Image (spheres, rainbow, N blue to C red):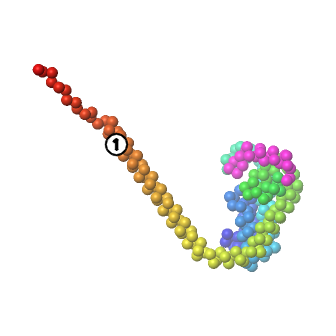
Amino acid sequence: MDWLLTYSYLGIVVFLVLTGCGLPIPEEVGILTAGGLAADGRINPFGALAACIAGCLLGDSLMYFIGRRFGRALLQRHRLWQRLITPDREQQIEAQINEHGLKVFFLSRFLVGVRGPVYLTAGILRVSYKRFLAIDALAATIVNAIFFTLAYRYGKQVFAWVKQGEQRLTWIVAIAVLITGCGYWYSRHRMKLQKQRQAKSVIERAAAVHQDPPRVSVPDDKT
């Protein structure tokens, strides 16, 4: 996340827009990082929190307008979007929106992996953007305030723990990699031995079937 610091508030906004558009990283990562940087005194806390909220709203609005502009044809023609939301899932979300209304938009803000498909479906259904933006702004403000405050409150302590635990973490990772590698080698070696035994057993059975039958001596009938 060093580039968030390099590009400061713009980096925060861009990162959260990308997560809102389907980047497979929870947006809370960006919010917590921004809060931690503010706690460390590297950026202004009020500016960082405003950047977080703005990035979330821009990403959500972008998904809304993509759905509104291209509709269901986007899901039917492009496999890239089908990875984010399949037509069947879109119909399920549509049913939830029709049944529960704007509550779905509020609750989806708190669910990782659900926000993007819900906001895309809102655009497809042409839900009023003013109502959509109002409820989304409320939910985004609550989520950002919670995670940002936690990171800002405990950020310095977390950074101190990270610095103290870097060496231990390195050893833990190295040991885990070594154990995983040994386990993988052992499983491969064991599988190889099993295949060799199976092949040997097949060869032995084949040899037993094709070996010459024992000769039987026939007594002479001459008297």
Image coordinates for residue 178, horizontal then vertical, percent: 51, 66
User: Given the image, on which type of amino acid does mark 1 rest?
Assistant: Glu
**210 horizontally vs 43: left or right:** left
> Which residue is most to the front?
223
**Total number of numbered discs in the rendering:** 1
Q: Is residue 17 visible?
A: yes
**For the C terminus, which image quadrant?**
top left
Q: Is residue 198 above or below residue 20?
A: above
Q: Position of residue 127 (x, y in %)?
A: 85, 50
- Residue drawn 46% across and 59% down? 185
Magenta stretch in the rendered image: 82-103
Task: Give the main secondary structure of the magenta stretch.
Answer: helix
Q: Position of residue 63 (x, y in %)?
A: 77, 54
Res 108 → quadrant: bottom right
In the rendered image, residue 94 lying in the magenta stretch gets the answer yes
Residue at 83%, 64% (x, y): give it.
142
Q: Nearer the viewer, residue 5 or 111?
A: 111
Residue 24 occupies quadrant: bottom right
Residue matched to label 1: 204
Q: Nearer the viewer, residue 155 or 178?
A: 178
Quadrant hosting residue 164: bottom right
